[in-house]
Image: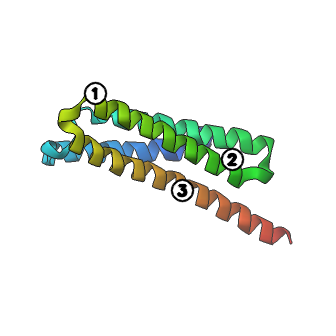
Amino acid sequence: MNQLFSKIPHLGLYKFSFFVLLGTLIFNIVLPQYLYHQIWVVLLFFFLLTLASLHIIEKFTKRNSDNFLAIYFSVMIGRLFISIIFAAIFILADRTHVFNFSINFLILYLLFLGFEIYGIMTNLRHHFKKGIEDE
């Protein structure tokens, strides 16, 4: 069974997204007035953006692992600009729910960014320990 799960790319992202989705569903039941009415679109956006970010980092790191930090920070800057454009479009399209959208967007942005940073730190820690053992 473990072999089946090891072949699924970015399984951690799927698990994390499931828990965020579950939390959003619970929040929608308990305090629906604080949840943006199109939160599912925002969740899908962050899931796809994080998936694309991980894929790009993985692809370019395989080509040139020496420039990992440059690749990672370039992807992060691109992610930030794409998020700003996405938020601007939603804010301009729906001015009546700007506050709910902004708060929900910020929370989800920080959650998915935290997941990505945690994943990178775990990966770097593994490589760092491997490098020390090689010496």
Depth check: 5 or 90 in front?
90
Q: Mark 3: give few (<14), some (14-19) or many (20+) Cα within 10 Å.
A: few
Q: Residue furthest top?
A: 93
Distance Cα–Cα, label 1 vs label 2 = 33 Å
The three-letter amino acid code for the residue at tag 3 is Ile
Answer with mark 2 or mark 3, whichever residue precedes in sequence. Answer: 2
What residue is shown with label 3?
A: 117
Q: Residue at x 22, y 46 (%)?
A: 26
Distance Cα–Cα, label 2 vs label 3 = 14 Å
Q: Residue at x 64, y 49 (%)?
A: 72
Q: Mark 2: give few (<14), some (14-19) or many (20+) Cα within 10 Å.
A: some
Q: Secondary structure at mark 1?
A: helix
Q: Is residue 72 visible?
A: yes
Front tag of 1 and 2: 1
Q: Position of residue 125 (x, y in %)?
A: 65, 65
What residue is shown with label 1?
A: 93
Q: Position of residue 33 (x, y in %)?
A: 13, 43
Q: Mark 1: give few (<14), some (14-19) or many (20+) Cα within 10 Å.
A: few
Q: Secondary structure at mark 3?
A: helix
Q: Is residue 29 depicted above or below 48 in this figure?
A: below
Q: Which mark is residue 71?
A: 2
The three-letter amino acid code for the residue at tag 1 is Ala
The three-letter amino acid code for the residue at tag 2 is Ile
Front tag of 2 and 3: 2
